[in-house]
Image (cartoon, coloured by chain):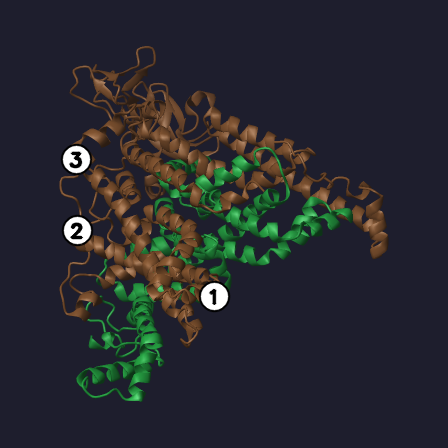
Amino acid sequence: MSTTTSPPDTELHGSASGGTGVDARLRTGEHPLSRVADSLSGLLVKLVLVAAFNALGIFMLVRMASLDAPWYGLVMTLVTTIALNVIYLGKRNLPLKYLIPGTLFLLVFQAWPFVYTFFIAFTNYSTGQILTQDQAIERIEQLSVTTLPDAPRFDAVPFADGDDLALLLSDQQGQEFLGVPDDGLVPLQELEVVRDADQVVEVEGYERLSLGAAQDRIDELTEMRVPIEAGEVQLVSLTTATLREQTRFYDPETDRLIDEATGTTYVASERGRFVSEDGTETLTPGWRVVVGWENFAEVFTNEAIRGPFGRVLVWTYAFAFLSTFLTFAVGLGIAITLNDARVKGRKFYRLAMIIPYALPTFMTALIWRGMMNRSFGVLNDMLGVAVPWLNDPNWARFSVVLVNLWFGFPYMFLICTAALQSIPDDVYEAASIDGAGGWQRFHGITLPLLLIATAPVLVATFAFNFNNFNVVYLLTGGNPPIVGAATPAGHTDILISYTYRIAFESGGGQNFGLGATVAILTFVLVAVMAVLSFRWIRPLEEINE
Amino acid sequence: MSDATRDPRPSAGAASMSAGAALADADTHRSAPPRPALQRAMRWFRQVGWRYLVVAVALFFALFPAVWVASAAFNPTGSIAGQQLIPDPVSTVNFDVLFATPFWRWFANSMIVAGVTAIGSTFLCALAAYVYSRMRFTGRRVSMLGLLILQMLPQFLAIIALYLLMISIARYFPTIGLNSLAGLIAIYLGGALGLNTWLMKGFFDTVPRDLDESAKVDGASHVQVFFTMVLPLAAPILAVVTLLSFIVAINDFIVQSVLLTDEQQFTLAVGLFRFIAEDYGARWGPFAAGALLAGAPIVVLFLFLQRYIASGLIQGAVKG
């Protein structure tokens, strides 16, 4: 990114920027030295900031490395830190210095999630398939640690050094060891031991716990594991311990998992599970694998998904269109009504009308939900009817649109009021001289001018309602449910609430793969809309200035 | 319940009532020649009076839920059934129930998240708008168009990826990962650049460039021009963008509900939703009390800044 007409970067050499500056300062009586001080303090601030984010970068790298972060995470952090140094310490790239802060957040928390969604859509990422294969193997191996029927037993005595616990263990051959959670078993002969009448009372600073003291720490003691070569030693009572062994082992060469206790071999399947060779047993957890277009194929071919998806898709467009159209119509109607100087108290009405807009939607949606309750809600109560506002598919759709009209009409009212006031009066005067009536004036002058002025707002409102999660999810939760749907889906669900419910509320757990697929399809629809509507968006014209 | 149907028509509406009565009167005496007073009233109604009727209906529609919630908050029965518009007797029992939850904690969390997000994103936005307004460079056009496209794709469409991203961040940096307010703020700052940048750039364009030029002649650096000249002159647009970002953050439900898992970390949106979703019928009153306490400051803020908001809205900002 090279600057073509940018001003020189003067922050490092502000005091040396030329004679005109000195003249100007002399004229204004400002002491030349104060400029030097200014630029010095500016430099200082800059250096402190650069040092701060370098410290942050180094901290992040160390922390990630110590926790075995994947290599690409480390590389990204390193590259980012270096790039920031180059940009901010260099004298070029002035626009970048201003753009980087926002862009950095944008890349990490908006651009990357979009890219990552694409990736997820091609996997079977879901409950039971969350981990990577390495993590799943590690987990399966951990879970396979168990006490075998013929496991060796130890006589055990608990010891403690403050918070740290240890076990004095003697095996069946009479050999004695000290078992420490971090260090494993150490033969007692090699350690410093204090005995009292043949009883070991202290080893390497660990003191023997009385039975009562051990009883007090029973939870800690039973959770303690002493790792040894064959597995781990765990207390089974306050005086005995037993060996627990890992029974399942992964063989990286054949990509198989072998259970040494039963002799079963498990093969890694393409679905991300270890399955026994006879196909009867599947181990959990599994891991996520790339399944290609499978999720997309599901959406388009599985009737239990395609049916609800189609309904949701159609309803999303209908909801966005109805919401935009009705809020505009009602808002415009009220704006025209009030756009008459003879009406008194117009300021007050405008102020009052802003209240639905000002109240947080998460709250008002829940309030409407209460008011529309079939048995107890105030609407049925007041009207003396029993309308199933939220329980019947058609009524629920009506209710969602009605509530969204309530949310949206004040906004359109404000917009239309402003737009109406910007239409010059002489246009109307000319029209009435030509003999145009009220309807003709509206149809021929007001509406076209208004549509031009509000087109970008209408497009933005449509796009906003297309993904208006709050109203749908908080009012109806997407319900009433569509019968026969394979995933949670309802008659008032729009694409975004449908996505959310597949991903986080599926009956069998979370289904991220399928959810991401629906999200991708939504991206595409919105992107098409964005491109089509670009010509209406006014700011575009300013870009070439 | 019939109380609720009473029309809260403003006093000016009374005139239209009498006009309506006069109209009905006119119908019954069609044969008689119209009296001049009646004629005047009819003309007034046709031209002006009906407007009050429309306003009355609109105000009723707009304000009824708010009035209803305010009344529910003070109703002695906390249940959703058997509510009256005028609470009898006025009771604060709902508030006691509400305060048994971490309501103020949620309130503080919401204010922290929305406040920091609002100030942070306004600043990030202003930085970008400044270069877009004052400098010409390769990639300017492309990146500005890119921002417009991004604006159409709301961040929460990628909610699944955001959730998984925050889980992996939590593995290394729990303070900004899943279930942290800082993580939530970071996500919102990711959406800072967008239409608001355009809005601000448009305003910066109206700040005369001669001002910066003369400041530069005086030896001011671009940083000084930005902080001491452009920002103060652009205060109105900064107020609009700050307020709108604040509202967007307060209103968001989807990201907060996925990200925040611990009751102490909940915001108002998640906390109040979980609170009432557990038992809609019985917790209606306490919920209304919470809604009143949470909504009132925001409404007041809006009414104070109404003029600024209207100007921002007209330029295409949409509440999220």
**For residue A273, what is the image quadrant?**
top left
Q: Name which residue lies at 35% across and 32% down.
A: A157
Instruction: Please tell me the colour of chain A.
Output: brown
Q: Is residue B147 above or below residue B284?
A: above
Pick whichever of labels 2 and 1 is earlier in the sequence: 2
Identify the subunit bearing mark 3.
Answer: A
Identify the subunit bearing mark 2.
Answer: A
Q: Which mark is residue A425?
A: 1
Q: Are marks 3 and 1 on the same chain?
A: yes
- Which residue matches tag 3? A304
Pick whichever of labels 3 and 1 is earlier in the sequence: 3
For label 3, count other residues whose C-alpha is less than 10 Å away and answer few (under 14), some (14-19) or many (20+): some
Q: Name which residue lies at 48% across and 61% down.
A: A422
Q: Amino acid at mark 2?
A: Pro
Give the CA distance from mark 2 to mark 1: 47 Å
Q: Is residue A221 above or below residue A294?
A: below
- Which residue matches tag 2? A393
From the viewer's perspective, tell me whether residue A361 is left or right of residue B172: left
Give the CA distance from mark 2 to mark 3: 18 Å
Instruction: Please tell me the colour of chain B.
Output: green
**For residue A419, what is the image quadrant?**
bottom left
Question: Which residue in the rendered view is the most extreme toward the top?
Answer: A253
From the viewer's perspective, tell me whether residue A187 is left or right of residue A59: left
